[in-house]
Amino acid sequence: MKYMFFNLLTACSFLTPSQPIISDEPVTSFTQGHYSQWPNGPSTSESFFPLAVWLQNPSRAEQFRQAGFNVYIGLWKGPTENQLSQLKAAGMKVICDQNEVALRNLEDPTIIGWMHGDEPDNAQALKEGDGYGPPILPSKILEDYQAIKKADPSRPVLLNLGQGVAWDNYIGRGVRRNHPEDYPEYVQGCDIASFDIYPAVHRDPEIAGNLWYVGRGVERLIEWSKPRTVWNCLECTHISNVDRKPTPHEVRCEAWMSIIHGSRGLIYFIHQFKPVFREAALLDDPEMLRAVTNLNHQITDLAPVINSPTIADAVHVVTEPDDAPIATMLKKHGETTYLFAVGMRNQKTEATFQIYDMTGQIKVNVIGEDRSLTANNGSFQDVFEPWDVHLYRLKNLGLK
C-alpha cells in the first residue's frame, strides 16, 4: 500500500511448475477462539470475520459500516481523541498506532489491535529525495513489537508486508529482492501477519491479471507465520492505473480465494491516486460499492462456517482442462457441510468434485445463485467461468 507521504505503497495445485509448492492441504489450525488470548483484541464470536478498510477518515465510519465493514486499519496522524470518538459512535473497531492518545485510552474497546509502520520489507525512502535504502531489518521489527507488547499485551500487533510475500522478484525490495527467507524473520514481530499485492491493476506483465498471486501470497505467509493469524489486502479501485480497475467479479474472486487459502481477515485498499486523488474512491463508485457491500454481507453471513475448522484431505478435484485448477475448502457447521471453490486461472473450467465418505444422492445448493446440483456418492460437476467462485451447501455428510 502507499498513502501520501509515508510508506503504505486449498490446494497448491494452482501454482505453476516454476513456483515452489508450500503445502499440500488446507489450513486447519485457526479457529475464532484464537483471538481469546487477547482480552481487548478482536471479537471471539464465531459470527465475526474482520472486513477492514485501510487508512480512512473516521467521519465516514457509518458509511463503511453500512457497506459491511467492521474494522479500520490505521488512522491518519492518529489516533486522536476525536477519531476514536467518531469510530465509537459508529460502532467501528480500529487497529492503530500505539501513540500517546492510544495509551491514554487503553480501556476503550474501540481499539482492538496495534500496528507497525507499513511494508518494512520494502526498500525505504531516504531523506530529502536521495533515493531508497534497504528494507527495515527484521530485528528492528521484533524490537518494536516487544516494546508495543510491553506497553499493552492485551491486544494483538498487526504487521502488513508488501508484494515480496507473493512475488520473489519484486524490485521494490531493493537489495533484498529475491530473498524470501527474510519473511519468517519478519513475522516473529507480530501476532497478525498481512500482505498486499494487486494483480488486477498491476503493470508488471508477470503479475498483471494473474489473480492467483493473491492465493499464493496467503499460502506462503501462512506457512511462514504459523501459528500466527494471517490477513491480506484486496484491491477495488484504479489505485494508480488509469487504464484498469478490478471488476466486481475479480474482487469477489480475490476475496474468496484469500479465504479458501486460509486468510482470516480482509483489508480493502480503497484509495485512488490517478488520474486524481480520492481517499475513499470505493464510495464514489456505485457499482463497485454495491458489489463490495453484497460481498461483505455474504462473508459475514458465512462467518460461523469460515471460522469453523477446515476438513482436510476430504475433497478431490479434477478439472478440464487440467491446467485450470480449482482451489477448495471444506467445512462442517452444525448439520450442514459447505464446499467453497474458486477458479485459479483466467479460463473456463469444468470441475468434477469427489467428496470422500459421502454416499447416496445428495442435493447441492449453490449459495447465492438460485440453482442446485445433485451429488451421487460424493461426486458432482460444475462449470467455472474465468475467476469464478461457487459456494456449495450440502446436508450433513457424516464427515469427521
Image (cartoon, rainbow, N blue to C red):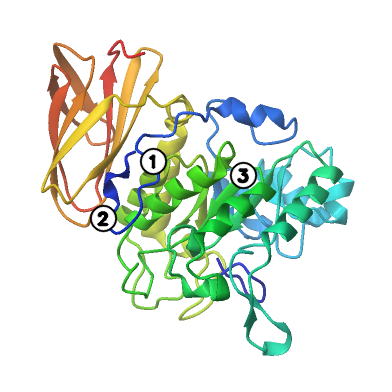
Q: Residues within 10 Å of mark 2 (few under 14, many from 20)?
A: few
Question: Which tag is nearer the camera, tag 3 or tag 1?
Answer: 1
User: Is 371 located above or below residue 184 in the figure?
Assistant: above
Residue 324 visible here: yes
Q: Earlier in the sequence, mark 3 or mark 1?
A: 1
Q: Residues within 10 Å of mark 3 (few under 14, many from 20)?
A: many
- Give the labeled residue for mark 3: 192
x 68%, y 67%: residue: 136
Q: Position of residue 31 (x, y in %)?
A: 53, 27
Numbered tag placed on residue 17 in the rendering: 2
Q: CA distance from mark 3 to mark 1?
A: 20 Å
Observer-nearest of 72 and 162: 162
Q: CA distance from mark 2 to mark 3?
A: 30 Å
Q: Three-letter amino acid code at disc 1?
A: Ser
Q: Is residue 36 left or right of residue 164?
A: right
Picture quadrant where residue 326 is located: top left
Q: Position of residue 339 (x, y in %)?
A: 29, 29
Q: Residues within 10 Å of mark 1 (few under 14, many from 20)?
A: some
Q: Position of residue 58 (x, y in %)?
A: 67, 56
- Give the labeled residue for mark 1: 23
x 32%, y 44%: residue: 12
x 70%, y 41%: residue: 156
Residue 67 visible here: no
State which quarter of the image contains the N terminus: bottom right
Q: Three-letter amino acid code at disc 2?
A: Pro
Q: Is residue 297 left or right of residue 21?
A: right
Numbered tag placed on residue 320 in the rendering: none
Q: Are marks 1 and 2 in contact (CB under 8 Å)?
A: no
